[in-house]
Image (cartoon, rainbow, N blue to C red):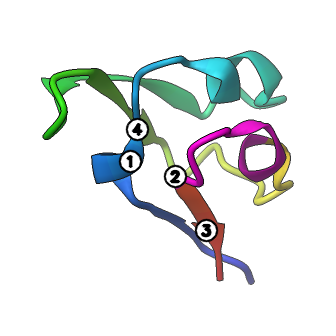
């Protein structure tokens, strides 16, 4: 089964990925990343590895292995 990997140092907190996740698996992490933006987290229990977040993210935060 595929696994999702995050490069949160690239995340600028646009949350576009949250708007396209069909399972609501992506949410704000409540912490600031290296660049000072609020980053995201993924609930791996809810994630179905559909790739919607990967296709939507303008900053290449997501990688599906």
Q: CA distance from mark 2 to mark 4?
A: 6 Å
| Residues packed near mark 1 inside 10 Å, few (<14), some (14 to 19) or many (20 plus) | some
Residue indicated by mark 4: 11
Image height of 3 relative to 50, above or below: below
Marks 2 & 1, CB-CB < 8 Å contact: yes
Query: Earlier along the polypeptide chain: callout 2 or callout 4?
Result: 4
Query: Earlier along the polypeptide chain: callout 4 or callout 3?
Result: 4
Image height of 8 relative to 21, above or below: below
Residue indicated by mark 2: 61
Instruction: State yes or no: residue 55 in magenta.
Output: yes
Residue indicated by mark 1: 10
x then y, percent, for residue 55: 83, 48
Q: Quadrant of residue 2?
A: bottom right
x then y, percent, for residue 16: 67, 21
Marks 4 & 1, CB-CB < 8 Å contact: yes
Residue indicated by mark 3: 63
Q: CA distance from mark 4 to mark 1?
A: 4 Å
Residue bounds of the magenta highlight: 53-61
The residue positioned 56% from the left and 44% from the top of the image is 59
């Amino acid at each position: 089964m595929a696994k999702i990997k995050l490069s949160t140092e690239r995340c600028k907190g646009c949350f576009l990925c949250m708007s396209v996740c069909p399972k609501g698996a992506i949410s704000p992490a409540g912490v600031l990343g290296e660049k000072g933006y609020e980053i995201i987290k993924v609930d791996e229990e809810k994630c179905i590895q559909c790739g919607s977040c990967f296709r939507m993210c303008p900053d290449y935060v997501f990688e599906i292995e």
